[in-house]
Image: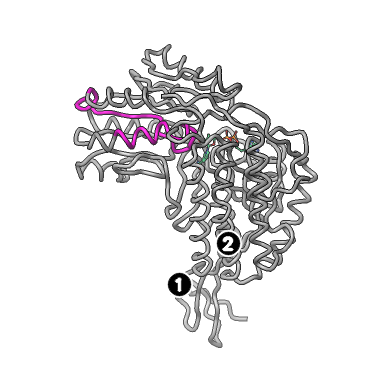
Amino acid sequence: MARFPVTGEISADADALLARLGIADDRLTGTREAVTPLTGEVIARVADMDAPAVQDAIGRAHSAFLEWRMVPAPRRGELIRLFGEELRAAKADLAALVTLEAGKITSEGLGEVQEMIDICDFATGLSRQLHGLTIATERPDHRMMETWHPMGVVGVISAFNFPVAVWAWNAALALVCGNSVVWKPSEKTPLTALAVDAIFARAAVRFGGVPEGLSTLVLGGRAAGEALVDDPRVPVISATGSSAMGRHVGPRVAQRFGRAILELGGNNAAIVCPSADLDLTLRAVAFAAMGTAGQRCTTLRRLMVHDSVYDALLPRLKSAYASVSVGDPRAEGTLVGPLIDAGAFEAMQVALEAARAVGGVVTGGERLGAEFALDGYYVRPALVEMPAQTDTVAAETFAPILYVLRYSDLADAIRLNNEVPQGLASAIFTTDLREAERFLSAAGSDCGIANVNIGPSGAEIGGAFGGEKETGGGREAGSDSWKAYMRRATNTINYGSSLPLAQGVTFDV
Ligand code: NAD
């Protein structure tokens, strides 16, 4: 089912949202075009920052850090609590702007803002739990402990597909930990970033004011990102985007001995075992593979189906692909909105052609609604039955393509799961305890996320989020991810009057 035409006064809607969200007019001038993927129309213009302007912002953020680090952590948590309240108040408008700027369907736009609210709640609680250990010492009348201190300016570089939540995962934690934050959002989604900046400013006023530059936005493309990456006053760079971006950013940060949190591309798989509940599997696979038009880092891209259930599952999956509603992401009932731009559409077609060339059988993948949607790129999600895991399958194409492979032995399916350069998310569908536990074991999935009977996409903030290999190794959000934004000091205190040295060393002067 297709939901076209994409109608309405998109520019006027955007203007109204930008005004309601409180974005000052002077921030909406410049030469960079903010384009909606719904129709390809320009809905606003913003100004890029050059490298000196980015460096100024970093200078202000550094000064802000020097003050902020001395504010008690629970008080810092209060700022994030207020920010969460402001986000609740602005949820519908911010979500609608996410839909206009990133093309997410309404429920996913709302879900993204909810994720920001959730991480604010998490970080507020965390602000009273930034604790270290007390450690047994071999020396009498001594005590040893660790303390955690903020790092300084945290640079956040984010991707278009989670235009606001990724910043919030980083910023909420970084700020309660006592850091300041400089954010370089995707050049494809500047408006949602401006909106978040305005919402944060409201929380800061209610807080009673924060040091100027505590949270700063720098707009621009790669050059603005590089100015942040190369600045020695930024001890932590958290960069979310393609593995190609991480391959540039990682070594540059390492060269100046900075710390990089890299959240890069995924090529996520699911294994469907003989005992799988196929009704549940079908729903999970459909959402994980087609949701967000295949533009999640955790999107399901490879499906390994056991021989014994292949013929039962595939026809049902094909009919789900044929009937999924594609079109205007604002319309009720739409499940798949547009790709971000023409480049994404072209990359999808190139990948499908490469799959065909090696024997892949493609269902779907064609452009929809071109006659109605101007320069909006809508596609029917593609299902590709593949004879083997070829190079095309092993690469991340950021579009709704699901490659399907057969297997007969679980060990082979796990090998296929792991035999790609990326290591973000994975899943197994089974009701056999042995299979599930094998998949989760050290000899199972090599990914940062491994699920049983749920798809690989759609993480909760309570767990640490991230993946291995070309996904970059970073972890964000829950568990002990906060430690990435702090430095650890080991403290030894002598409360006696002698000076015993460690390891029995004597040194009498
Ligand atoms: P992208 O790599 O094109 O851009 C991401 C960000 O990096 C942008 O802000 C961009 O301006 C900046 N950038 C690019 N090159 C840079 C450089 N050399 N130095 C500094 N900054 C640079 O990614 P995209 O197309 O916006 O997003 C899609 C990609 O992001 C996919 O590969 C997806 O899997 C990945 N992603 C990963 C996660 C995760 O948590 N692992 C989350 C979301 C998206």
- Left or right of residue 415: residue 491: right
Q: In the image shown, does 139 or 91 lie closer to the viewer?
A: 91
The quarter of the picture where the N terminus appears is top left
Asked whether residue 436 is drawn in magenta, I would say no
- Count of numbered marks: 2
Up-down relation of residue 416 to residue 150 (above or below): above
Q: Nearer the viewer, mark 2 or mark 1?
A: 2
Q: Position of residue 495 (x, y in %)?
A: 54, 85
Disc 2 marks a residue whose amino acid type is Ile
Taking 357 as reference, is 154 above or below it?
below
Q: Quadrant of residue 442?
A: top left
Residue that mark 2 sits on:
80
Instruction: Looking at the picture, tell me which residue is in the foreground, 429 or 231.
Output: 429
Q: CA distance from mark 2 to mark 1?
A: 31 Å
User: In this orientation, which residue lies closer to the viewer: 76 or 113?
Assistant: 113
Quick one: 257 or 161, which is closer to the camera?
A: 161
Give the magenta-colored segment's residue range. Answer: 282-311
